[in-house]
Structure formats: C-alpha cells, structure tokens
Image (spheres, rainbow, N blue to C red):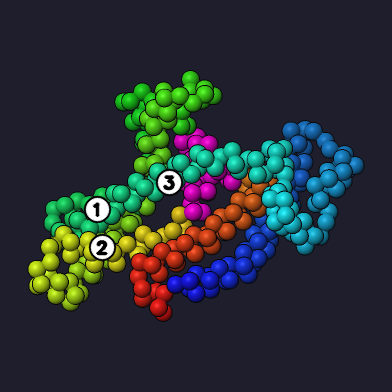
Amino acid sequence: MWGFVLRRLVWMVPTLIVISIISFIIIQLPPGDYLSSYIARLEALGTTVDQATIDALRLRYGLNDPIWVQYFKWLGNIVFDFNFGYSFEWRLPVSQLIIERLPTTFLVATCSLLFAWSVALPIGIFSAVKQYSLGDYFFTILGFLGLGIPNFMLALTFLYVSNRYFGLSIGGLFSPQYLNAPWSLDKFIDLLSHLWIPVVIVGTAGTAGLIRITRANVLDELRKPYVETARSKGLHPMLLILKYPVRIALNPFVSSMGFILPGMISGEVIVSIVLNLPTTGPLLYAALLSQDTYLAGAFVLMLAVLTVIGVLISDILLAWLDPRIRLS
C-alpha cells in the first residue's frame, strides 16, 4: 500500500510542473492583455491615453518581458512567497481575493456534495433492489429530469418560489439586514434559510447522475454468483446487500473525488451568477473576460493542482476499498 502511495507522490512532481506551464500558456493565448483591454474600454468612453502612460504601465506590470521570463517570475513568487501576483482589475493581491471567497465556496460545495451523496446512495440502492417497481420508475424519471433541466433554470425557479411563497430576499446567502452584521444566532439561522437553495440546485445534477451509476453497479453485483452463494447460506438480505454489492458500488463515489476538490473552488459559475453568490466562480468568470492574467492564472493553476490532489486521494481510497486496484 505504501509503495502504491509513494509511486503516486513521485509522479505528482513532474505532473505539477507540466500543469503550471500549460496553465500559464492558456492564460496567455487570447490576443492582447489586460492593459490593451483596459485602454480599449477607456477609448470607448472617450478617454484618450498617451503612449508614455501606456509604456509606463506595461513596464510596471512586466508585460514587456518575454513569456518565459514572466512564467519564471510568476512561478517563483508562488513557490517561494506564496504570492500569486496582483489583480489588475481589482487592484488587490490575487491571494487576498481568493481567500475572501474560499469559505463561502467551500460551504456551498461541501453541503451540495453531502446532499448529493446522502440522496443518491439510498435511492440508487433502492432502485436496484426494487428493479422495475413503481418506486424505481419514479426515481428514474426524477433522475432524468435532474440531468435534463439546466441548473440556471432551477436557480430562477427557486428564486421565484422562495421569494413568492417564503418571503426570502432574492439572491445571496443573507438577507440585507444581516449582510454586514456580526455573526449571531439570528444571522446563522438566516444563512441556513438561504443556503438550501444553492445546495439543492448545485447538488441536483450530481445527485441524478450518481443515482443512475449506483443503481447500475448494484444491479451488476446482485447478478454475480457470490451473491447467490451468500444468500443460499442464509445471510440476512440487508447485510448481504450492504456488505458486498454496495461496497463495490461505492467505487464511483470515491473515484469522483478527483473532480470534487476543483469543483469546490470553481463552483457552479452560472448558478453563482444567477443567485448572486459570493463564491469564486463569478470571480473566475470576470477575470477571464477582462484578461486579468494573474487572477485567471491563479484559478487555472489551483483547479489543476486540486484535480491532481483529488485524483491522488481517490486512488488511495479506491486502493483501500478495492484490493484489486492496489494489487494490479
């Protein structure tokens, strides 16, 4: 087991180096840069910018350096100083902008993940055990609806329902009177009254997909000879299902860990914009639109690194859960 983990850790080093290079190239691919976009916006408003000012700004932000020099400066600041650079658009350090939105992002993403898992696992098992029953058909239709309805449509529907029938303020995670108020029991209750909306919306698509995967995996295991053998020996049906088929069916839950961590950071961008959530998704979207190089680059790099870490965690959990993986 430890040899398995060590091999994964060794391969992470060159992988992360390649990822950093690709991330920096990706953010440099669009024509122009933030400064050219900024000058174009000023000229569209009728403001002229003299060439001396443009040259001074390009020198200040290091935009005249070759791309490889910019890359090594960027990577060196991250590795040695944990400095992701300076946001041109927000006029703030990139790390400060990201840290400010991380708690909300992790809260929404974690609750959405727990919601998806807690709903998908029992429903998937029930649909497999009660195959072709009325409940199976009901949850199958519900799953297809969850996969087919866009999240932004659900967001708009929930906004209307929550405001029309529950009197909640539209968008955000707090009512206006609690937005800048210090933490208290009333503010926490207000947070919970708003939090369920993005949690259900973001978790719906993942729930629907995991239901179908769990159902298919459990059905496949229930048809295998060892299940019939265990049943013939008098093993309790519930214990039989939970101890063997369900354990194998947990593989897709564990293997999805590689996409959970980056999903926690990026979030559902469109849903966050529609619901006006202070998460990292809208910040990433705005950085890409304005070509805010260092802010966008920090997000791309973080998402890639979290994907690698998530895959490592899922590999370790899968090896622990299924001995066939580590033995191979």
x and y percent of residue 214 in the render? 28, 61
Res. 145 in view = no
Residue 14 vertical placement versus 283 (above, below): below
Q: Earlier in the sequence, mark 2 or mark 1?
A: 1
**Residue at which label 2 appears:** 246
**Residue type at tag 1:** Pro
Q: Check the image and name the residue furthest to the bottom.
A: 328
Q: Nearer the viewer, residue 115 or 176?
A: 115
Residue 47 vertical placement versus 98 (above, below): above
Q: Residue at x 52, y 24 (%)?
A: 182
Q: Check the image and name the residue furthest to the top.
A: 177
Q: Residue at x 34, y 46 (%)?
A: 115
x and y percent of residue 50 in the render? 87, 39
- Magenta range: 261-285
**Residue at which label 1 appears:** 122
- Quadrant of the rendered image containing residue 216: bottom left
Q: Nearer the viewer, residue 278 or 113?
A: 113
Label number found at residue 110: 3
Residue 190 vertical placement versus 85 (above, below): above
> Disc 2 and disc 3: Cα gap in Å?
23 Å
- Quadrant of the rendered image containing residue 165: top left
